[in-house]
Amino acid sequence: MARAQTGTAGRRKANGAEGQGKAPATVAATKEDLLEYYRQMLLIRRFEERAGQLYGMGLIGGFCHLYIGQEAIAVGCEAAKRPGDQMITGYRDHGHMLVCGMDPREVMAELTGRSGGSSKGKGGSMHMFSTEAAFYGGHGIVGAQVSLGTGLAFANAYRGDGKVCFAYYGDGAANQGQVYESFNMAQVWKLPVVYCIENNEYAMGTAIDRSSSETKLHKRGISFNIPGEEVDGMDVLAVKAAAERAAEHCRSGKGPYILELKTYRYRGHSMSDPAKYRTREEVDEVRKTRDPIDHIEDLLEKNGWADEATMKAIDADVKRIVADAAEFARTSPEPDPSELYTDVYTEA
Amino acid sequence: MTDILMPALSPTMEEGTLAKWHVKVGDTIRSGDVIAEIETDKATMEVEAVDEGVVEAILVPEGTEEVKVNTAIARLAGEGGAAAPAKAAPEPEAAVDPNPQPASRAEAKGDPVRAAAAAPAAPAVALKDPELPEGVNLVKVTVRDALRDAMAEEMRANPDVFLMGEEVAQYQGAYKVSRGLLDEFGPKRVIDTPITEHGFAGIGVGAAMAGLKPIVEFMTFNFAMQAIDHIINSAAKTLYMSGGQIKTSIVFRGPNGAAARVGAQHSQDYGAWYAHVPGLKVLAPYDAADAKGLLKAAIRDPNPVVFLEHEMLYGQEFDVPEGIDWVVPIGKAKVRREGTGVTLVAYSRMVGFCLQAAEVLAADGIEAEVVDLRTLRPMDIGTVVESVKKTNRLVTVEEGWGPMGVGAEVCAKVTELAFDYLDAPPLRVCQEDVPLPYAANLELLSMPSVERIVAAAKAVSYRG
């Protein structure tokens, strides 16, 4: 029952006064920035909740991995990116799509497998892309995005265009061999890639200390001479600051950089995971004490920037966007049968 | 007013138990609140609120079993300020099918003929090798140098083309195919990699996604099995999965098939493996002119191309046109020898074996027609069928194992398209169905040979 009182408004009240005890009274961000990060994180959360609902209604099929709890990472890194910087991630990709400027309608319609989806319905939850937004997927093979992202960075170095690639992966993928093959080449060739490890503590159902001989994943670059740091992945400003440092390291020609972003996913690995490998108390504790949206609300309040009208307007705006995306995803037609044979090969 | 529906935990769930309510009538709920727990025989899960409002009614009490998915389980009174348009709320009477089967998809699935009819037809324009302009000299060039020349010419023409692989730069290539390229193009474009096929194939594909044109050399295709995930899952499928957005123009090349006395792990023909995969183009040339012309075509192609070379051909010399931009079209077989008695279909090194077999057969009065597939995907089955219509007999020859192989595909297509023209069941000459042995005599026994091709051609001709 206690959980029933932890909604947005409830959280604001509960945490607003005593707070999380670590939010500084002044922050290295403007009111506008903070409100924008809040808006983006809230958009991801509401979007994912709605995606979960559509999945429950049978409108989304197959695998569907929700990003709830990890919002500060995609938003914080995005805030550190410059125009043209690329992004690539695994299958937990909806949040990344939303922050890089993709139309929520296209993202939701891809989840429902409709023609209005970003891949015309042919990719699904795990396979979404946007060349326009320099978002290179959306990859279903654990760890593949790390080599591919290193390849995107290779292209940046080849062209000398100053771009940086942000390659995201989880604590599970961190044990894949190709990650270390990529580390090696990225450092030998000084490629501008930021390896963003979203350490949510569980690789599907396997806790990190059951699968990893070194659980401090930011140390995994030591034998390749790649610097790494641990970051509070629930604090959007900490993420942004670390991502800026990492990107600057890359842009200055020093090669790759590792960020281990400590986070937590509230939902199961995918929609069909009941998450029996951890206790409800553990999840509750994170939600109550480390929630990234609570945290930014707290920052806004402490700075006196959380006036009710503004916050309500953002909430309403986000709800409208998500409702509109869901409606679009329900009503967008399925792809025409002729699409079965398109996009297998390209002419130019 | 909004109804909360019984959710499915998985695409296959049809009903479940409403185990527990975490809210009661009169409670205000917010997005993300856990409002209930539901159970199936497999799992228990929490239901989080998406819609907001005050609980007006609990429609299904806790403890109720066999609650159908999408049944209304509670009702919310709309709260002031809710921004969602009414129509976005779940419709109580919608009774959404948890496994919606659109009429259109059922149609495409249920009618293979119609589905096949919708498949893209062969290109209308006949693919032909370029005509040799008058006065062009043919010069003897090894397959090795022809491949090198193809890469060098394309690298001169396009600064986005680069070569990466083990020993391609300072060592000048494990088989000397890249000899001289480092000197001409420098280390930025001719790149020695560590021995990490999985990683550098992925880096190559990533660079291609960013618009470069990598040539990824595998020291042999045996080692590309470490990288096959990126060749198939990352390179071949991404155009489709991205709805046409992400193009991957990349060439994976290197020697394929058995060399000599290197044992089972270094002696395998991967033609059938890659030719199985939509999204890839797969080339396997025989002579130096095709090696050069097809490699240039592969580098220019906007799709991922698997380019299968043969170590035993690298040192062989063939005529190659000199001084012109020699590009051979992908997807076109070549009749290497004309004949009316039997059709021999092969690719790569086996074309040479077939040409030798044809001479032996000619001495016996059987004129064999030798079709060099050159491209395994998309396969030019039309040229094979035209030949079979003339000869009425078919033998396929490949270095790979027979089951599920290239020969199996050729035989299937010929029986589908020219069944009435066949005067004998087609035969396949392949590697014996064993890992390639090391011992010299056993190795010879396991490989296709001129003698076995001759024997098969005679068998389909009913000549003993």
Image (cartoon, helix red, strand yellow):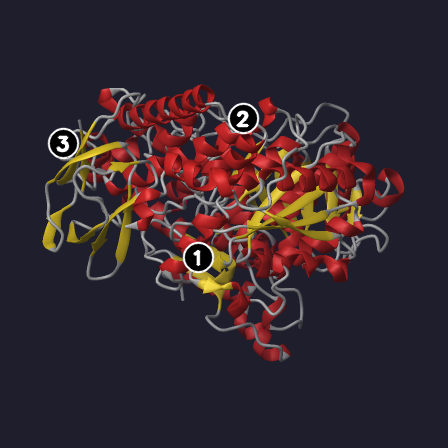
Query: What's the residue type where badge 2 is placed?
Result: Leu
Q: Which image quadrant for residue B270?
A: bottom right
Q: Is the residue at mark 1 from the same chain as the one at mark 2?
A: no
Question: Could you give the CA–CA distance between mark 1 and mark 2, rounded to whole angstroms?
Answer: 60 Å
Is disc 1 placed on a helix, strand or loop?
loop
The answer for which chain carries disc 2 is A
Is disc 3 placed on a helix, strand or loop?
loop
Q: Which residue bears the numbered disc 3? A: B92
Residue A50 placement (x, y as % from top left):
33, 35
Q: Extreme front residue here?
A: A17
Is disc 2 placed on a helix, strand or loop?
helix
Q: Is the residue at mark 3 from the same chain as the one at mark 2?
A: no
Residue at 30% from the left image edge and 42% from the top image edge: A61
Residue B379 placement (x, y as % from top left):
47, 41
Question: Could you give the CA–CA distance between mark 1 and mark 3, rounded to whole angstroms?
Answer: 54 Å
Residue B207 placement (x, y as % from top left):
66, 39
- Residue B49 vs residue B146: left or right? left
Count every numbered label the image shows and give the total: 3
Q: Are the residues at dot 1 and dot 2 in contact (C-beta closer than 8 Å)?
A: no
Residue at 39% from the left image edge and 55% from the top image edge: B408
Query: What's the residue type where badge 3 is placed?
Result: Pro
Q: Residues within 10 Å of mark 1 (few under 14, many from 20)?
A: many
Q: Which image quadrant for residue B158?
A: top right
Residue B459 placement (x, y as % from top left):
39, 62
Instruction: Answer whether residue B281 is visible to the viewer in this image.
Output: no
A273 or A22: which is nearer to us? A22
Residue at 54% from the left image edge and 68% from the top image edge: A209
Q: Which residue bears the numbered disc 1? A: B405
Q: Are the residues at dot 1 and dot 3 in contact (C-beta closer than 8 Å)?
A: no
Query: What's the residue type where badge 1 is placed?
Result: Gly
Q: Residues within 10 Å of mark 2 (few under 14, many from 20)?
A: many
